[in-house]
Image (tube, grey):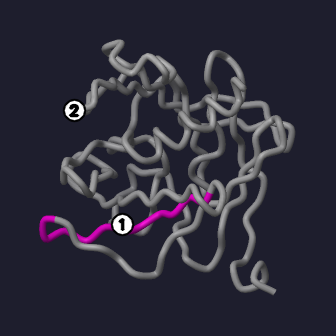
Amino acid sequence: MKYVVALAMLFFSCTFISCTYIPTGLGNTDTYPKYEQSSKFKKIFLTPQGYTFAEYYLIKQFTFNNQLYSARVRVYNEANVDTAYFRENKEGVVYIDPKTFIETVDLPKDPKPGQKWQEPTNWVYEVKSIDATLETPIKNWSNLIEIEAKQTTGETKDKFMKYSNFYAEGIGFVGSIVDNELIAFFKEKVDIAQSKE
């Protein structure tokens, strides 16, 4: 049951909270880690209990407030699909809530340990490390960016109060930890054309 709740939290964080993925190709800056954003492949993730979900980018871009955003889709199951929208601005890579049109920093430019920011939904984010490690059943990762999210009020008592997401150069999001337990991790990239056969 704890892992079902954890997956629900991961879905919640993808929909309403930033720190979900670090897009690339959004600008010409050397301060961002380089992550691949492509509609030609999907990324497959696992949970320790064997649940699977997929993530991919749409070819089409979307406009909100006269700004272009890349759309990232996560498919948890046929009834549970999440789309999140990202672009780059002077603060870094940002996520926009398409209902409120409020942008939140997903990853600041030139992330540094201790760097903090807050979003309107009562969450505070902090860059905990730019050389973090993460052990998963697939791979032991190093040189990751770790972003910790903490809820600043107890208004969402059925959700976790704190979690960490991890990002790798060339891939983006590779895993989440809640209550010191791994809840989701990167498995592989799959060519979309091949996966439809």
| Left or right of residue 23, residue 80 in this image | right
In primary-sequence order, the first of circles 2 and 1 is 1
Residue 81 spot, x, y in % from top left: 54, 59
Can you tell which mark lies on residue 111? Answer: none
> In what element is the residue under mark 2?
loop
Rounded to the nearest angstrom, the CA distance separating label 2 from label 1 is 24 Å
* The C terminus sits in image quarter: bottom right
Q: Residue at x 51, y 21 (%)?
A: 160
| Left or right of residue 132, residue 125 in this image | left
Seen from the viewer's position, the closer of residues 50 and 107 is 50
**Is residue 71 covered in magenta?**
yes
| Left or right of residue 81, residue 126 in this image | left
Under mark 1, the amino acid is Leu
**Disc 2, disc 1: CB below 8 Å?**
no
Residue 162 spot, x, y in % from top left: 49, 19
> In what element is the residue under mark 1?
loop
Can you tell which mark lies on residue 26? Answer: 1
Q: Which region shows up in magenta?
A: 65-75
* The N terminus sits in image quarter: top right
> In which image quadrant can residue 17 be found?
top left
Can you tell which mark lies on residue 120? Answer: 2
Residue 38 spot, x, y in % from top left: 55, 73
Seen from the viewer's position, the closer of residues 191 and 47 is 47
